[in-house]
Amino acid sequence: WDWGKLPVTGRAKSNVDWLNHSDSVLGEIVSIGDELCRYLTLPSTSRARHRIMPFGKRQAKDMRKLGDHLIESILSRMNRLSLHCEILKLEGLPGNEAARIRQWERDIVYQMEGLQVIKEYR
């Protein structure tokens, strides 16, 4: 947006380091994918041994704790992505484009919750 328009506004006038901003956004997206993969590949804890045997109960508790930590980390990363969108809005990103980014964020969280339900069920 604001490519080469006169007078100088938008990105050209901004003091934001856009390369650093882009690297930060990319890092968050890659980390979300990495942590989601780690969460989805955790061992299943829905077998009978995880409900009856003392060792199984401990194992299930440990896996749930790790899974909860990963989900919390993913959600905090999604929050940081939202904050990056706010920076864009402050620097002049049109509202309709920001709304599209927000829609993508909502869709990702919604789909992730569906994967979490499937993971915990099985």
Image (cartoon, rainbow, N blue to C red):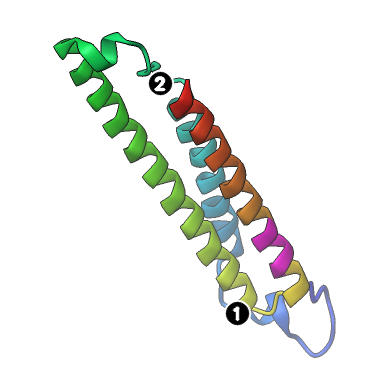
Which residue lies under the disc numbered 2? 42
Magenta stretch, main secondary structure class: helix
- Can residue 114 be seen in the rendering of this structure? yes
Where, by quadrant of the figure, is residue 96 drawn?
A: bottom right
The mark found on residue 90 in the picture is 1
> As displayed, is residue 65 above or below residue 48?
below
Marks counted in the figure total 2
Residue 49 lies within the magenta run: no
Foreground mark, 1 or 2?
Answer: 2
Mark 2 residue element: loop
Is residue 75 left or right of 4 when viewed as pictured? left
Q: Quadrant of the N terminus?
A: bottom right
x, y (%) of residue 82? Answer: 54, 62
Q: Are marks 1 and 2 in contact (CB under 8 Å)?
A: no
Which of the two residues, 25 or 106, is positioned nearer the viewer here? 106
The mark found on residue 64 in the picture is none
Q: Residue at x 57, y 38 (%)?
A: 114
Which of the two residues, 93 or 64, is positioned nearer the viewer here? 64
Is residue 113 left or right of 13 when viewed as pictured? left
- The first of marks 1 and 2 along the sequence is 2
x, y (%) of residue 27? Answer: 52, 45
Q: Residues within 10 Å of mark 1 (few under 14, many from 20)?
A: few
Give the residues drawn in magenta, as a range. Answer: 98-103
Q: Residue at x 48, y 39 (%)?
A: 31
Residue 100 lies within the magenta run: yes
Q: Residue at x 83, y 76 (%)?
A: 4
